[in-house]
Image (cartoon, rainbow, N blue to C red):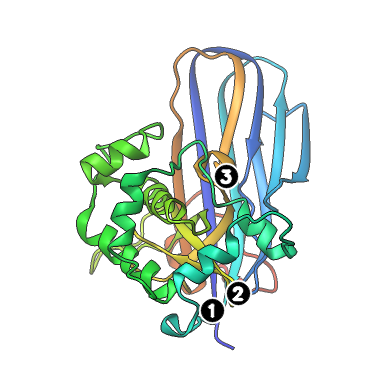
Amino acid sequence: MSFVRYHIRHDTRYEYDQPVGESRQMLRLTPRELPWQHCLSHRLAVDPQPTRSNDFVDDFGNKVRTLHLQRDHDALVIRAESWVEVTPREWPELNKGLNWERVRSTLAYQAGKRFPPELLEANRFLFESRHVRVKREFAEYAHDCFPEGEAMLVGVERLMNRIFDEFTFDPEATTVSTPVTEVFEKRRGVCQDFAHFMLSCLRSIGLAGRYMSGYLLTRPPAGKPRLIGADATHAWVAVYCPESGWIDFDPTNNVKPDMEHITLGWGRDFADVSPLRGVLLGGGSHDPEIKVTVVPEGEFDEVYAEVEDAPAWLPGLSPEPEDD
């Protein structure tokens, strides 16, 4: 079976205007174990060292690390490094599945109806959440993509196509707190906005959709080297199909995720699966500096050849670089 291995380095740095006396942080930076994705190794470095840390699995199955810092600090640096192996996914034929009305009926609550575990899990993703709204205008937008009797996955793909065609990627148009209704009005935003909007459309017509958080391999311009820290976290959606389980769609890039998407985790929206979230005492104003680098195994030596803090090569993954 063919596969691709990636090294991911996710750096977060906070510089505080005033000393922080105490800080609690919650990290979701460990790639998920999936049928098509295996996390070969994962390590975390934190400066200053936390007083305590703890690991647990949240309600959605995501691995979480908590940090508790109890001494004064004016900066916080967190580096997560992972090696991940990705294999091709098996995709169902989009036009051979249940029509969307049948799926909606299967998911809908009925008194006395017994739901198997997989349907109970999917039901968690039918309703409004902090960043996803269920509204008539979203249903009307989606219905143009779901004519009567349409196979559900064909309609989902058509909705993804429409969002890609009608919305403009614009990092300056929104912030993390911009309401999805405003995104719809402006038709501009980033991957997080497009995922929230697509989920709003799907849930507004009674389909179950979850927010996917992870990374996407980006390609540098022709003739230019891959730059360290030039990547970012990425967001897309997954839709529940009773016959096939959860199927991913990426409205930002108009693709069905496969070998170049690395999954960190999922939730109802961004608030459930933010890679890093915390509370602190003191600090004044501060904004994080985030740098992400996704490197295919074959480019590892070239990218990190002259970097002083280059990551260690994972033993056993392939031969370590020889010394000059």
Q: Which mark is residue 273?
A: 3
Q: Is residue 267 above or below residue 93?
A: above
Q: Residue at label 2?
A: 36
Q: Is residue 71 left or right of residue 274?
A: right
Residue that lies at the very extreme toward the bottom in this rendered image: 1
Mark 3 vs mark 2, CA separation in Å: 20 Å
Earlier in the chain: of badge 3 and badge 2, it is: 2
Disc number placed over residue 89 in the picture, else none: 1
Q: Nearer the viewer, residue 103 or 181?
A: 103
Quadrant hosting residue 156: bottom left
Amino acid type of the residue tagged 2 in the rendering: Trp
Helix, strand, or loop for circle 3? helix
Amino acid type for the residue under numbered disc 1: Arg
Q: CA distance from mark 2 to mark 1?
A: 6 Å
What's the residue type where badge 3 is placed? Val
On residue 253, which mark appears? Answer: none
- Residue at 43% x, 51% y is 204
